[in-house]
Image: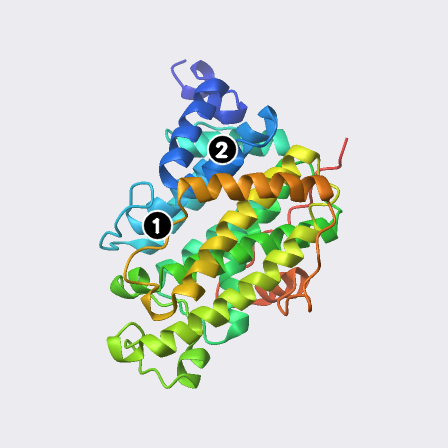
């Protein structure tokens, strides 16, 4: 008579874990406004529905990153105790969120909400979580392909989800590939800007082959006597970023105007970070490179006319790292178990 199966009813699964959607959106905006001012500025250009969904997706990405690094909204890195367990927790909470179950974490519930609205899958989320798993085990890229794989996991896969949030169909491989290019470009700019911070935290995302080519000894990348070589590496990152950025803009042509304007604004703002690191040469890490508010506004205005013109110039050569090739390598990699290949739901 008192058996739980007779007196307890299973919880009703609801998108967002049953939380009020407006509260999820409000909290998500607080996170993006504090954690990424550049992206927050560009996100205001989306139409209302897309803007709110972008914020909820960002909140999940930010929260996963903070859990992995022991940070608070991208603050100082903390000592990493139990990083593998942290990654497992991220995966469990994400699965619960996608299944419509409450997670007791508003950022994960926000992801559950946007996943339900935009048909984001656990496979897509696993591609991103795999990047946190790489960080958790102290992984470092050996060559350019390894760097491409890392950039895909931590940013390119997010770009693919962003495209879905903006309404890009699941079978539009070309646009999804260009969205991946955009994420990779963003991450390359971040890596170039944060070389000193990463070095101080014991991390290095520069391929070992690149370091060997510059005759940089292990652990010596940011030493004063290697500033010239570090600048050469930053330029290489910036040039690769530029190629991916130009390729990414080709994918904006068929987006709605406001989405196109927002994406071009974000591309131009993040691109300016990479270009500034390159311009500053060996002084690039004396202070953290940021884009001033007046310059951001100017870039947003420029992006408005670029979106109106809607004739992006292709790069001289398309990126060496293609979405299809990276995805194939990811699926075949033995380092991290490939995510389950859950088919995308049919479009309405």
31 w.r.t. 12: above or below: below
Tell me what residue is drawn at x 41 percent, y 62 percent: 277
Q: How many marks?
A: 2
Q: Please name the residue that numbered disc 2 is placed on.
A: 55
Cα separation between marks 2 and 1: 20 Å
Relative to 72, 116 lies left or right: right
Residue 332 disc label: none
Residue at 29% over, 72% down: 222
Question: Which image quarter: residue 3?
Answer: top left
| Nearer the observer, 149 or 123 | 149
Q: Quadrant of the C terminus?
A: top right
| Res 68 label | 1
SS state under label 1: helix
- Residue density around tag 1, few if under 14, some if 14–19, many if 20 or more, within 10 Å: many
Residue found farthest to the left: 79
Other-residue count near label 2 (Cα within 10 Å), few / some / many at <14 / 14–19 / ≥20: many
Closer mark to the observer between disc 2 and disc 1 = 2
Residue 100: give x, y in percent of width and height. 52, 28
């Amino acid at each position: 008579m008192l058996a739980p199966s007779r007196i307890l009813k299973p919880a009703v699964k609801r998108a967002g874990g049953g939380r009020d959607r407006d509260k999820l959106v409000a909290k998500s905006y607080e996170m993006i406004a504090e954690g990424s001012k550049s992206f927050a500025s560009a996100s205001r250009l989306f139409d209302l529905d897309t803007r709110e969904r972008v914020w909820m997706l960002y909140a999940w990405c930010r929260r996963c990153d903070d859990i992995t690094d022991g940070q608070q909204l991208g603050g100082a890195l903390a000592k990493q105790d139990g990083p593998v367990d942290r990654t497992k927790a991220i995966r469990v909470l994400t699965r619960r969120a996608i299944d419509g179950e409450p997670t007791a974490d508003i950022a994960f519930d926000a992801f559950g909400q946007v996943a339900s609205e935009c048909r984001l899958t656990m496979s897509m989320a696993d591609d991103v979580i795999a990047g946190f798993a790489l960080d958790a085990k102290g992984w470092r890229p050996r060559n350019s392909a390894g760097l491409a794989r890392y950039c895909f996991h931590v940013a390119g896969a997010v770009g693919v989800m962003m495209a879905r949030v903006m309404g890009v169909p699941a079978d539009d491989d070309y646009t999804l590939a260009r969205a991946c290019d955009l994420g990779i470009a963003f991450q390359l700019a971040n890596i170039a800007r944060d070389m000193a911070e990463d070095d101080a935290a014991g991390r290095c995302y520069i391929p070992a082959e690149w370091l060997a080519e510059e005759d940089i000894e292990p652990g010596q990348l940011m030493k004063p006597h290697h500033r010239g070589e570090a600048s050469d590496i930053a330029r290489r990152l910036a040039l690769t970023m530029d190629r991916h950025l130009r390729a990414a803009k080709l994918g904006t042509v068929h987006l709605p105007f406001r989405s196109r304007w927002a994406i071009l604004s974000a591309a131009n703002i993040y691109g300016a970070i990479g270009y500034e690191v390159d311009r500053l040469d060996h002084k690039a890490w004396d202070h953290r490179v940021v884009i001033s508010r007046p310059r951001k506004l100017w870039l947003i205005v420029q992006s408005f006319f670029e979106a109106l013109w809607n004739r992006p110039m292709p790069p001289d050569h398309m990126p060496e790292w293609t979405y299809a090739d990276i995805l194939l390598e990811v699926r075949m990699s033995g380092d991290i178990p490939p995510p389950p290949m859950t088919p995308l739901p049919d479009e309405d």
